[in-house]
Image (tube, rainbow, N blue to C red):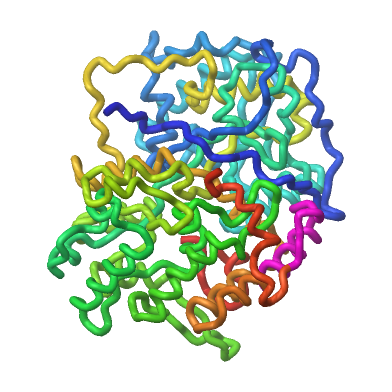
Amino acid sequence: MKRKFLRTMACAMSVCMLSMSLAGCGSDAGDSSAPESSSPESSSPESGSPEDSGTESSESAGDEASESGSSQAEGGEDGAYVNPNGDLYPAYDFGGIELTVLGHNDLGNLDPSGENLEPYQVADRQAKKDYIEKKYNVKLTFVPNPTDVWEDIPDETVKQYIAGTPVADIMNCNYTWVASYVANNILYDFTDSFAGSDFYMDNYKFWWGGKNYGISRSMGGEGLYYNATMIKELGMEYTPAEMFDRGQWSYDDCYNYLLEMKQLMGEDEYPLFVSPYYWMLFGAAGNGTEIMASSGNLNYCTEPMLECLEFLKKCVENGLQNVPRKPKDDGTVGYDNWNYPGETFDKGQTVAISHRAAWQADAVKGVFELGFVPYPWGSNVTIDESQVGNSGAYKTLSDNYMHTYFDGYLTCLTNGIESKADPMQVLSMVTEWIGWDDSLSAYVEPEPEEEEIITAPGWLEEDTIDKELYHFVEERQRLELFNPISDVKGLELGMGKNLSEAICEGGSLRSNMESAYNQDMQALIEMKLVPEDVFKPLGSGEGSSSAEGEDSSAEGEDSAEGDGSDDAAE
């Protein structure tokens, strides 16, 4: 079966009705209205409805993705770069103006002056830059991030914009920073421009709060990884991936599997470890729900969400998952959820199954035989029961069985760009430079000369059900809006603390989540991140009916974790 390494997918980027403006922090710099002739190719209007997003495995998100343009290039005279798809891009003349480019993410991987480059890489990047500058009659100048401290980049970018000195004209930013940038009116709004053009495919347009801010690719690769060496040594009849393949990975099936495993393990060994927040972030999609609905309401207390969280709570209460408590400086107890899997699972010790990102999974390659299994499902997801027990039964899972991604790269422009050049024309130029040819409506994927061999991801064995399942969930990924929202500076949420109290300390799950729902909805409304009318306060014992209708995925870590947890983004 032929698969593209960079593929598109449904992701519900219609996003909540976010009126992203922080009081006192906005900027009037730049008019977001589209200038005349703002489309590279003026054509029939599009519906404008957000549906899909381009996606790439996080394995490709570094140098491999960045050199994609070079790998497509055909050598010209004297080693000059020639884009075989260059005819897809009109050769706009920018009159020799200078545009600044933030040397970050995929754009940073085009900088000839980047660090630790081989001579051929410098030459390739310079040739491509020369090609773009000559074709468009433009000077492109790379500028560094405003700070070397990763978590401070969005805040420093906002500060410079408000001060009237934008960091750069052209950026390639992470999804987790978009909320802050939109809230402070930094990003150019392409909504009207895209509505009058079919230059870009809908599935690459990045929608946020009903508006479009550029084109994007999303990063996948996260999920449940397992120590196949350990599990086979325990004598388990099937691996987790084989259980999923047979359609026997429901919450009940998964729990019984973990229980059997624990009975074969030592006292200080555990079948599972996933931090409570990450279980909520990723596990909810497996039960056909999401943390934040498209309306902006939080699904903390819907029945599918509570069922998802009850599973992890049950695992902790019955000794199938450890709670890595550690004392904090203020005398309270926290949880070492970030370091614990690295100190156990990654070393082939103590824990058999854990949530890992792609880069973490790749790092343990060679330590033990690594396997991959998607998250289990609950009663909100259905499967053809007649197929359960047979290989391939998972293919009958209902369409609402999904897989979470929460980050990616947005290629965008800073407000004020319209005073220098036509924004749509600039975006077209950047698209050619960055090598995202497949985002264009006119792009036709060339037929391979021979059968394509899928090697990604490199940390999973070839021709295994694990790799097949990895690609299965790639096709079912959808953006979890909550994580980028929770990263907004100054937003204090109670969910992490309340979730830890319920999962790790035996508290009432429903009452803790109801309390967190009321607190967090009010916090989101106060910061104008969600509309006020979607909030319907919940009271202890009142159930979840007022929030349940917002579960838009059902068929037919610091700020998120709160003060009670030490989880960080894994």
Residue 463 horizontal side relative to residue 33, left or right: left
Q: Indicate yes or no whether the magenta region holds residue 268.
A: no
Res. 21 visible in picture? yes
- Percent across and percent down for residue 549 are 66, 54
> Is residue 259 shown above or below 327?
above
| Residue that appears at 87% across and 54% down | 24
| Residue that appears at 66% across and 51% down | 154
Res. 103 visible in picture? no
Q: Which residues are magenta?
A: 515-537
Asked which quadrant contains residue 243, the reply is bottom left
> Is residue 220 shown above or below 492?
above
Please identify the dominant SS of the magenta region.
Answer: helix
Q: Nearer the viewer, residue 69 or 131?
A: 69
- Percent across and percent down for residue 291 are 58, 57
| Residue that appears at 38% across and 57% down | 376
| Residue that appears at 51% across and 44% down | 478
Q: Nearer the viewer, residue 456 or 475?
A: 475
How many labels sit on residues?
0
- Name the quadrant of the N terminus: top left
Residue 370 horizontal side relative to residue 570, left or right: left
**Please, which residue is most extreme toward the bottom here?**
331
Residue 416 horizontal side relative to residue 386, left or right: right
> Is residue 169 shown above or below 533?
above
Asked which quadrant contains residue 214, the reply is top right
